[in-house]
Image: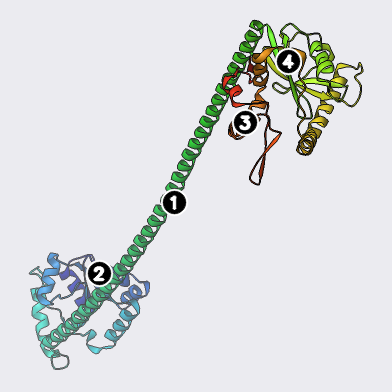
């Protein structure tokens, strides 16, 4: 758009001289002014105004020329466009901003009106500040008065312009109110959405925090359970280790105590054997009978074997000698050892165990295994032999035990010693029964005693007096 660069009086003089339409555009710094300026810069609008021989001038709102112009033509709205005819009457006032097509339509309507240009038309001289155009004003007054009957008066034009401006202002106010209302509604909607989004985010954060807190509590609980389980396991391990160490220590103590007792017993037995000059031996036969004899401590085991063969005279010829505690079975190599060396002094119990085959010279390992087998067989048959002996005793009576010449000539003290000198097993198995029934059983009775309908077995060769006078050493053997 090509705007007039001079002042308002110069523009009025140019429009007057060329009988052209006078356009005054008052712009501000708002968006509407910029939009209206863009409309004037449109190629179609600019071409239309230039082809129509229109003098256009642009004034800045608030400037001095604008204030001078507003004294004649009130400026109500910024931006405003005043289309003034040759007679000085505003033909069209556009308040605000319009689109280029609408502006083109209004320009076309203006040029179709007959009052757009005229021969005697004039513009008001009061617009200019220069006193030079006074003659022009004088010349144009008659012409204006002559055209009043044909055209609307200035007051009507101004009133019409005011109505248009007021309508535009009211429309603008409504538009602004609607815009404010829409803006408020949009603000409320955005605020509501923001609030809902914030609430949703806070709710999500609370749920996430609750989930994390629950997860942390679960992890703490599992960690605490693992710690407690580890502590319990450590306590159990320590307790088990302590109990094991305690049991091992107690076992070692018991072993040491047992070893010490065994050593004491062996030492006592060895000392007793070394001090003793005699050895009192009790021989036990499979039928339950027994014989006791006192030997010299330096006598050999062969002397005991010969004594059994010559004096005891068992019903079998082949037999072996053994002890019950400790469990030993004497071999042919030990027959030449003394009783002191074999720890049979000062007293011992010898079992006379028969063998089914004659003794032959065999290797030591074979002899030991055969003797062990015979001992096992004899231990199985011994109960039956004892039962058979008891049964025969019930029917035929108990035979007198064999007594050697040495025992018969040893006097009453020897008899008491013979009756009192027995091994630990005989004392343990028969001592209690003899004590219980010694008072009820008179001397010289048989092997059983009747008390009502009850028959009790007894042994007339033993008495409680012998038990009271006997003494025992540490290895459960009787001391004479």
Q: Are marks 1 and 4 in contact (CB under 8 Å)?
A: no
Local SS, label 1: helix
Count how many numbered circles sit on residues in the image: 4
Residue 434: numbered disc: 3
Q: With respect to residue 389, does 203 lie above or below?
A: below
> Where 212 falls versus 371 (above or below)?
below
Q: Position of residue 195 (x, y in %)?
A: 31, 66
The kind of secondary structure element at disc 4 is: helix
Q: Quadrant of residue 408?
A: top right
**Sequence order check: which comes first, mark 3 or mark 1?**
1
Dot 2: element: helix
Q: Which mark is residue 33?
A: 2
Q: Secondary structure at mark 3?
A: helix
The residue drawn where x is 86% and y is 16% is 364
Q: CA distance from mark 1 to mark 4?
A: 96 Å
Q: Which residue is mark 1?
A: 218
Label 3 or label 4, whichever comes before in sequence order: 4
In the image, taking residue 209 as reference, residue 65 lies left or right, namely left
Residue 166, percent from left and from top = 16, 82
Q: Nearer the viewer, mark 2 or mark 4?
A: 4
Q: CA distance from mark 2 to mark 4?
A: 164 Å
**Which quarter of the rendered picture does the N terminus lie within?**
bottom left
């Amino acid at each position: 758009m090509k705007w007039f660069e001079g002042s308002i009086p110069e523009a009025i003089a140019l429009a007057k001289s060329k009988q052209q339409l006078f356009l005054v555009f008052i712009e501000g710094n708002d968006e509407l002014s910029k939009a209206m300026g863009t409309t004037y810069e449109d190629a179609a609008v600019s071409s239309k105004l230039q082809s129509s021989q229109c003098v256009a001038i642009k004034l800045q709102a608030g400037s001095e020329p604008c204030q001078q112009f507003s004294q004649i033509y009130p400026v109500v709205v910024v931006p405003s466009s005043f289309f003034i005819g040759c007679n000085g009457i505003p033909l069209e006032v556009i308040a605000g901003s319009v689109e280029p097509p609408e502006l083109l339509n209004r320009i076309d309507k203006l040029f179709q009106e007959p009052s757009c240009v005229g021969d005697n038309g004039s513009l008001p001289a009061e617009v200019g500040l220069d006193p030079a155009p006074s003659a022009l004003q004088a010349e144009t007054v008659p012409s204006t008065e002559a055209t009043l009957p044909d055209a609307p008066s200035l007051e009507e034009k101004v009133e019409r312009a005011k109505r248009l401006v007021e309508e535009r202002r009211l429309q603008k106010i409504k538009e602004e109110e609607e815009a404010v209302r829409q803006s408020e509604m949009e603000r409320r909607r955005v605020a509501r959405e923001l609030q809902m989004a914030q609430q949703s985010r806070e709710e999500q954060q609370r749920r996430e925090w609750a989930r994390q807190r629950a997860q942390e509590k679960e992890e703490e609980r599992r960690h605490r359970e693992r710690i407690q389980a580890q502590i319990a396991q450590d306590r159990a391990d320590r307790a088990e280790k302590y109990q094991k160490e305690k049991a091992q220590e107690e076992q070692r103590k018991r072993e040491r105590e047992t070893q010490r007792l065994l050593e004491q017993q062996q030492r006592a037995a060895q000392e007793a054997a070394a001090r003793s000059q005699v050895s009192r031996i009790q021989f036990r036969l499979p039928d339950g009978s027994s014989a006791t004899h006192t030997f010299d401590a330096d006598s050999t085991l062969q002397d005991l074997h010969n004594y059994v063969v010559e004096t005891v005279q068992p019903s079998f010829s082949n037999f072996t000698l053994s002890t019950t505690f400790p469990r030993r079975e004497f071999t042919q190599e030990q027959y030449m050892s003394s009783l002191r060396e074999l720890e049979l002094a000062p007293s011992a119990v010898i079992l006379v165990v028969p063998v089914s085959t004659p003794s032959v010279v065999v290797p030591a390992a074979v002899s030991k295994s055969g003797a062990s087998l015979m001992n096992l067989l004899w231990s199985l048959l011994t109960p039956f032999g004892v039962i058979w002996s008891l049964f025969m005793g019930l029917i035929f009576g108990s035979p007198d035990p064999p007594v050697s010449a040495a025992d018969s000539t040893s006097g009453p003290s020897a008899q008491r010693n013979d009756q009192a000198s027995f091994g630990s097993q005989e004392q343990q198995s028969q001592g209690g029964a003899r004590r219980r029934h010694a008072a009820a059983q008179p001397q010289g009775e048989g092997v059983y005693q009747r008390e009502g309908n009850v028959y009790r077995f007894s042994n007339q060769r033993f008495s409680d007096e012998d038990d009271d006078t006997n003494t025992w050493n540490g290895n459960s053997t009787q001391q004479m």
